[in-house]
Amino acid sequence: MTFTSNSCRPAAALCKSSAVLMFVALLAIMPLCAQTPSLDSVCTGLTAHEVTVGSFVQLRTAPGLKRPLKSSGTFVICGEGIAWKTAIPFASLLAISNGKIIQAGPDGKKNVLEASVTQPLAVLFTGDKDALEKSFSIAFSSQGQGWKMLLTPKDSSIASAIKTVTLEGDEGMDKRETFIDSVTIEETGGGKIQYTLSGQSHKNALNDDEKANFSAQ
């Protein structure tokens, strides 16, 4: 004869209830986990903040170079454009803004070049989808939370120097925390420029030093 204690029944019922709740919770988060980055979501994430700052490492290769040229420094991406402020191997500045390219050497003296082609280059990192589609053919792909954007210039003056630009990054669960992790520029002459970006953060506005990067003075 088998005896069953009534005291075991509440425990069994509790276990069954907990299992059901866990199953329901898993079903609720599955659609969220299954979401992958899209061109729209990445562009929305990149434009969610006024200013993005961070550090970069640049590797440049060319057919005539025996080994890659390496440099590093900090960068600023904002509505004005993008500024690369190199610290190693020597101080220099390259800022691409609307209608102009600003360069400076170790002495800080600036050289300003007026150029209409800067507009498409200035929007490369901003995530402005309309501006990107106007200036580039876009091939977008994603895997997991990682994404890749292959840009081919439509403007003949840019296409004469740049074959393609590839942007790669990750999209966090919070779409506003979307960052570009690397940039690869394939030049028509066979050269390549690779940027690795790190230590990125967002700000609401430029400080005085960052504003100076985009000033001709």
Image (cartoon, rainbow, N blue to C red):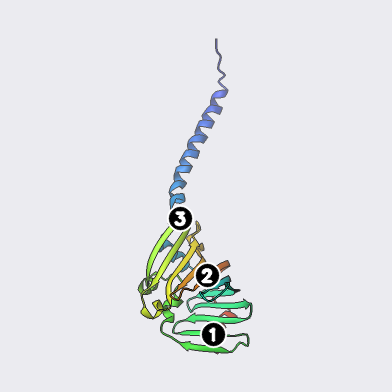
Residue 98, placed above or below residue 152: below
How far across and down, in percent of the image, does residue 66 sit?
57, 73
The answer for how far apart the CA atoms under marks 2 and 3 are is 21 Å
Q: Do we see residue 146 in this rendering?
A: yes
The amino acid type of the residue labelled 1 equals Gln
Give the number of the disc on residue 103: 1
How far across and down, in percent of the image, does residue 200 sit?
57, 67
Q: Which residue is mark 3?
A: 143
Q: Is residue 162 left or right of residue 177?
A: left
- The residue sitting at the top extreme is 1
Q: How many marks?
A: 3
How far across and down, in percent of the image, does residue 179 sit?
51, 65
Q: Which residue is mark 2?
A: 194
The amino acid type of the residue labelled 2 equals Gln
Give the number of the disc on residue 202: none
How far across and down, in percent of the image, does residue 56 sit?
58, 71
- Nearer-N-terminus badge (2/1): 1
Tell me the residue at 49%/74% (across/down). 191
Tell me the residue at 41%/59% (across/down). 141
